[in-house]
Amino acid sequence: MALHTDLPIYKAAYDLLDVVTDLARNMPRDFKASIGGKIRDECIEIMVLIFRGNTAREKERHLLDLVERLQVAELLLRLSVDKRLISRPQYAKAVAITSSIGKQANGWRKKSASSPVA
């Protein structure tokens, strides 16, 4: 088992948290705490679920939760761009990272489902 901070999915999730923190900081005050804070909280929870998935024997539940949280973050990012709280290039950057995380999480889930629990 690798240290969770060495996993590519963890590094991508950290990059997403970094991007989202900057996005939330630049949102209008009315939306900074509500939408911006919720996106940031989802990203932190994604990182926690990566840690849990890495340490748990039964990984699938944590990885499914991770994908669900990722979809919520993507939805909130989409709302942010539709409401013009963030720019399209900022949205594209964040969604490219969420897409990478989703692919890695689903690959990890499929791999862990096919391998025997040690």
Image (spheres, rainbow, N blue to C red):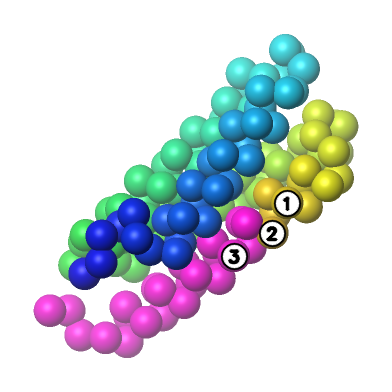
Q: Is residue 23 above or below residue 30?
A: below
The picture quadrant where one finds residue 20 is: top right
Of the image marks 3 and 1, the number of the one nearer the N terminus: 1
Q: Is residue 83 above or below residue 25?
A: below
Residue 61 in sight in this render = no
Which one is in front, 100 or 110? 100
Q: Residue drawn 45% across and 39% down?
A: 44
Q: Are marks 3 and 2 in contact (CB under 8 Å)?
A: yes
Q: Is residue 8 above or below residue 43?
A: below
* Residue type at the position of mark 2: Ala
Residue tagged 2: 96
Q: Is the magenta region chiefly helix, strand or loop?
A: helix
Which one is in front, 1 or 115? 1
In percent of width and height, residue 49 lies at 36, 51
Residue tagged 1: 93
Q: Which residues are magenta?
A: 97-118
* Residue type at the position of mark 3: Ser
Q: Residues within 10 Å of mark 1 (few under 14, many from 20)?
A: few
Q: Residue drawn 69% across and 59% down?
A: 96
Residue tagged 3: 100
